[in-house]
Image (cartoon, helix red, strand yellow):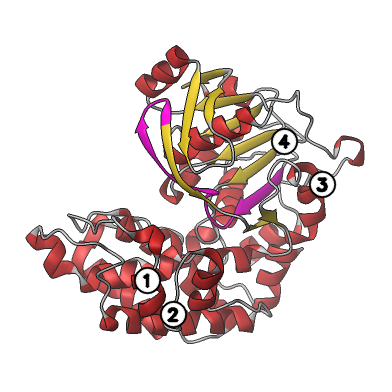
Amino acid sequence: MAGMQSISATPLVRIYHDKERIKIMTDKPIAIIGGGNGGQAFAAWLSLRGHTTRLFDVVEATCDAINKKGGVELRGSASELGLGKIAFASTDIAKVIEGCELIMVVLPSIYHKKIAQTMAPHLKDGQIVLLNPNASLGAVEFRKALQDCGCQADILLGAASTLLFACRAVEAGTVQVAGQKDTLTCTALPSSRNGELKERIGDIFPAYTFDADIIEVSLDNLNAFVHPGPTLLNTGRIESGTSFEYYLEFTPGQAALVEALDRERCAIAKAFGVNLPTIVEEYLAQYETKGSTIYEVLTNCEGYHGVMGPKSLEVRYLLEDIPYSLEPICAMADIAGVPAPTCHAVITMARAILGDKLDEGRTAKNLGIEGMSKAEFLKLCRG
């Protein structure tokens, strides 16, 4: 328990709140960590909005292609389109984040812990680190990783519930955007610093709202509920190599499973004093769809046309969404004292089928919240 108290009492990763430097200045470069579709999209979009951007990726060929092109071309349905010039792309993370006030980590949640360990020696006082997206309790995992590395940089740590863009990389240096969200939740850890985070990045990201905490942002991760369970029910089609549209060929049985998961999700939120819309309500608010049930809103969603189902069980719907989303959600349920038998059942089935192909992930122990009381966990999340 002493270890738990050290996390919530005097963290090594402190919150930066120097009021004299509360705004991100346009002449400060913004670092994008991750050269995948999301990272490239953010780097180009921010550049087109007048910000100097740099990009880090572990793949040298990706960096070389972007440097040769001079940036990333953004196509499709983003609010800004064209060639967003990138100052440089590099595999040297120290070079990329040096002098940056905002560092955006745009990576799958599988890599959050590793990238925190990589960044830890190079972080400086006053920097903002923003996870895009958080998945579930990503910021808690990130902070613990920095603490374990002995990082004492005075940073402001934040997390967004999902990516701003629905996009795919056509090639290194070209991203096609299918859509851009009008609004999404974002929080600082702890959320008592949300005002500071909003002051410093709110003008850069007008779609972000800052009235949530990491609990709400984590439970707002709908992928955890729409992906793993239905994928497991599709094992026959997936392993036989059958082509199918993942959402438009959803079955009533799959939807019933998601309904059960959503009830547990909302119960966990309620136990922490968070009022979440149901998945149906969220889909009706965010997507071009119709209906009153999960089955109807998924199969009627215009944006899901052409989204094909996986060809293998070794897919992010399981490899990422189970250990890095459902596991921490179950950890929150345990702390709140809320039964979550359906969530646990999905995890158990996935681990029985995939075995050691699944990471241990964000268990309560790995997050540093094992044995925490509800009050201690709320203090960690809210300050």
User: Which residue sits at x=37%, y=78%?
Assistant: 296
**Mark number, residue 110:** none
Question: Type of residue at label 4?
Answer: Gln
Mark 4, residue position: 127
Q: Earlier in the sequence, mark 2 or mark 1?
A: 2
Region of the chain picked out in magenta, as a range: 156-174
Q: Is residue 130 magenta?
A: no
Q: Main secondary structure of the magenta part?
A: strand
Mark 3, residue position: 199
Mark 2, residue position: 291
Gap in Å between the C-alphas at discs 3 and 2? 38 Å
Gap in Å between the C-alphas at discs 4 and 3? 14 Å
**Which quadrant is the N terminus positioned in?**
bottom right
Q: Earlier in the sequence, mark 4 or mark 2?
A: 4
Image coords of residue 56 (percent x, y):
50, 27
Q: Is residue 21 left or right of residue 375?
A: right
Does residue 96 sit above or below 165 in this rendering? above
Q: Earlier in the sequence, mark 3 or mark 2?
A: 3
Disc 3 versus disc 2: nearer the observer: 2
The number of numbered discs placed on residues in the rendered structure image is 4
Dot 1 falls on a residue whose secondary structure is loop
Gap in Å between the C-alphas at discs 3 and 1? 38 Å
Q: Camera-side residue: 9 or 322?
A: 322
Disc 4 versus disc 2: nearer the observer: 2
Disc 3 versus disc 1: nearer the observer: 1
Q: Is residue 250 left or right of residue 293?
A: left
* Residue sitting farthest toward the left: 240
Disc 4 versus disc 1: nearer the observer: 1
Tags 2 and 1 touching, CB below 8 Å: yes
Question: Type of residue at label 3?
Answer: Glu
